């Protein structure tokens, strides 16, 4: 069996007396596009942050995370040796995390810093080849016209596309996107999801994306991992996430509201995408 891109085993995390992740284990195979869903406060962002080592599990029974076969953290301690795996992981934030006063091009070039020598990174010296590659990354997200514009003058959707271009520049094998469309209008949200989906399909990148809109998850992802109260509630093909399971997951939230994005987010789903089978078959945990 090939090495999973993500392997989380028995993750436990408490903040004070509150346990927010409870014995979470799951694997993601290379090339999957997985939606991480669940009600607000269920632990999605906390889990995502654990995967890349931005947060560590508890010291006692904290569990472990490996990326691409290398341990990133175990029992609440970050493995320094996993720096390379962390550099191969791109993280996209809801609030974009761009440097507002810098140009679009420079923000994309920042994606290169992790693989540059410390001295060159400190001086911020980029080669012509790197600049050319940054332009190509911007072209892939449709922003090649804006390379000289300051990042803080862009719209939210454009900022998120720059953040994706930065991840492309990083040449990340794994992309973790934490609510990348939460603050975007429906059209920008659709553009961002289309770009992520293209990167997944064309470049074979592994993508894990936290989403609040279930229909967007259904539209773009093959598999769902659902958290409820910090526990793994469901892990399986997204088409097995029935209305009954959703109702129980969101505790009788208005399903129409969860679905509302579908109507406003555009065209009909291409049939090839709707029918695509998941890369791995996994078993629903509950529900
Ligand atoms: N640094 C922290 N200190 C204390 N509590 C925290 C911290 N980070 C997260 N939490 C708590 O952990 C729980 C899970 O938060 P998290 O942000 O992971 O949930 P989420 O599912 O991503 O929610 P949302 O969908 O609203 O973003 C929440 O109760 C939150 O208040």
Image (cartoon, rainbow, N blue to C red):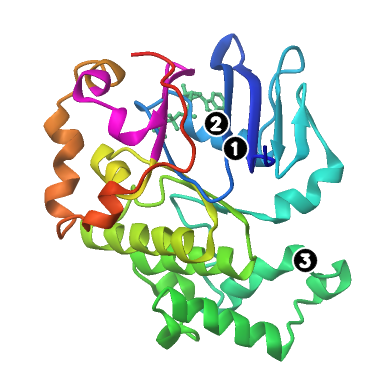
Mark 1 secondary-structure assignment: helix
Query: In the rendered image of this protein, does residue 80 appear above or below residue 62?
Result: below
Residue 134 lies left or right of residue 183; in this view the side is right
Query: Residue 6 location in percent, x, y?
Result: 63, 38
Label 1 CB less than 8 angstroms from ligand 1: yes
Query: Residue 99 location in percent, x, y?
Result: 56, 66
* Residue at figure coordinates x 26%, y 15% from the top left: 248
The quarter in which the C terminus is drawn is top left
The residue carrying mark 3 is 115
The quarter in which the N terminus is drawn is top right
The residue carrying mark 1 is 49
Q: Which residues are magenta?
A: 223-246
Label 2 CB less than 8 angstroms from ligand 1: yes
Q: Residues within 10 Å of mark 2 (few under 14, many from 20)?
A: some
- Along the line of sight, which residue is nearer the eye, 282 or 231? 282
Q: Are marks 2 and 1 in contact (CB under 8 Å)?
A: yes
Give the distance between the C-alpha atoms of the residues marked 3 and 1, in whole angstroms.
Answer: 21 Å
* Residue at figure coordinates x 37%, y 45% from the top left: 221
Q: Residues within 10 Å of mark 3 (few under 14, many from 20)?
A: few
The residue carrying mark 2 is 46
Mark 3 secondary-structure assignment: helix
- Along the line of sight, which residue is nearer the eye, 6 or 29? 29
* Residue at figure coordinates x 64%, y 43% from the top left: 5
Residue 165 lies left or right of residue 254; in this view the side is right
Q: Residues within 10 Å of mark 1 (few under 14, many from 20)?
A: some
Query: Residue 64 location in percent, x, y?
Result: 72, 26
* Residue at figure coordinates x 86%, y 69% from the top left: 117
Give the distance between the C-alpha atoms of the residues marked 2 and 1, in whole angstroms.
Answer: 5 Å
- Along the line of sight, which residue is nearer the eye, 201 or 171? 201
The disc, 3 or 1, on the residue closer to the chain's N-terminal end is 1
């Amino acid at each position: 069996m090939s090495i999973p891109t993500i392997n989380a085993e028995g993750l436990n995390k408490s903040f004070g007396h509150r346990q927010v992740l409870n014995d979470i284990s799951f694997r993601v195979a290379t090339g999957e596009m997985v939606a991480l869903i669940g009600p607000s406060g269920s632990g999605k962002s906390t889990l995502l942050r654990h995967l890349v080592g931005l947060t560590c599990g508890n010291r006692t029974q904290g569990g472990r995370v490996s990326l691409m076969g290398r341990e990133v953290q175990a029992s609440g301690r970050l493995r320094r040796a996993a720096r390379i795996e962390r550099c191969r992981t791109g993280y996209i934030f809801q609030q974009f995390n761009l440097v507002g006063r810098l140009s679009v091009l420079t923000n994309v070039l920042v994606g290169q810093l992790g693989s540059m020598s410390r001295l060159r990174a400190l001086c911020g010296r980029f080669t012509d080849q790197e600049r050319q590659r940054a332009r190509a990354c911007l072209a892939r997200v449709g922003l090649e016209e804006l390379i000289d514009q300051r990042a803080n003058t862009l719209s939210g959707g454009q900022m998120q596309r720059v953040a994706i271009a930065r991840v492309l520049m990083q040449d990340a094998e794994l992309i973790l996107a934490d609510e990348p469309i939460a603050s975007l209008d429906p059209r920008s949200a659709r553009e961002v999801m289309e770009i992520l989906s293209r990167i997944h399909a064309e470049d074979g990148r592994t993508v894990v994306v936290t989403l609040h809109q279930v229909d967007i998850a259904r539209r773009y992802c093959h598999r769902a991992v659902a958290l409820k109260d910090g526990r793994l509630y469901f892990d399986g093909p997204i088409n097995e996430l029935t209305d009954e399971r959703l109702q129980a997951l969101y505790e009788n939230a208005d399903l129409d509201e969860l679905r509302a994005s579908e109507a406003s987010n555009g065209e009909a789903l291409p049939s090839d995408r709707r029918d695509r089978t998941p890369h791995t078959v996994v078993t629903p945990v509950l529900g």
